[in-house]
Image (cartoon, grey):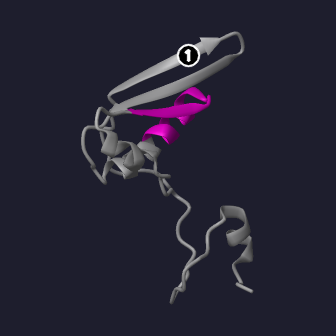
């Protein structure tokens, strides 16, 4: 049995073989300010609830987007304190599977 059964059971992923593990800083502050702008964002409000929706148009594969989209979601959720959804709009049927793939965090 893997020594990392907790990670396997929680994330439903097998931890690949590795040579080293280390504890790293818990500080996730960005020292260098980076401008992050989505294509559009809407905040829906009802009686006692809010939902933020980030809308992104995607015409072609851009691997950088899969790194930036989780940042958008985390920052918007942190800013508004509400559930945050990411809606990716594309006109290319080939893009649907790529955009629908889970984002590794």
Quadrant of the frame with the N terminus: bottom right
- Does 57 appear above or below 22? above
Q: Nearer the viewer, residue 31 or 17?
A: 17
- Does 88 appear above or below 9? above
Identified at 55% across, 82% down, the residue is 21
Residue 33 seen in the current view: no
Residue 84 seen in the current view: yes
Residue neighbourhood size for the residue with mark 1, other residues' Cα within 10 Å, grouped as few (<14), some (14–19), many (≥20): few
Decide whether residue 87 is among the magenta residues. yes
Task: State the extent of the magenta-drawn residues as a range.
Answer: 72-88
Measuring from the top left, give residue 65's x and y in whole percent. 34, 47
Measuring from the top left, give residue 90's x and y in whole percent. 32, 34
- Does 64 appear above or below 58? below
Marks counted in the figure total 1
In which quadrant of the rendered view does residue 23 lie?
bottom right
Identified at 73% across, 76% down, the residue is 5
Measuring from the top left, give residue 32's x and y in whole percent. 32, 49
Q: Nearer the viewer, residue 55 or 94?
A: 94
Decide whether residue 105 is among the magenta residues. no
Circle 1 is placed at which residue position? Answer: 44
Q: Nearer the viewer, residue 93 or 62?
A: 93
Q: Nearer the viewer, residue 55 or 93?
A: 93
Measuring from the top left, give residue 89's x and y in whole percent. 36, 31
Identified at 56% across, 26% down, the residue is 80
């Amino acid at each position: 049995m893997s020594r990392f059964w907790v990670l396997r059971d929680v994330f439903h992923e097998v931890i690949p073989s590795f040579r080293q593990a280390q504890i790293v800083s818990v500080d996730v502050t960005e020292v260098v300010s980076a401008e992050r702008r989505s294509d559009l964002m809407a905040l829906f409000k009802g009686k006692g609830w809010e939902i933020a929706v980030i809308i992104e148009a995607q015409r072609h594969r851009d691997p950088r987007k899969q790194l930036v989209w989780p940042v958008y979601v985390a920052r918007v959720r942190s800013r508004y304190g509400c559930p945050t959804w990411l809606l990716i709009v594309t006109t290319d049927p080939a893009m649907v599977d790529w955009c629908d793939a889970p984002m590794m965090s």
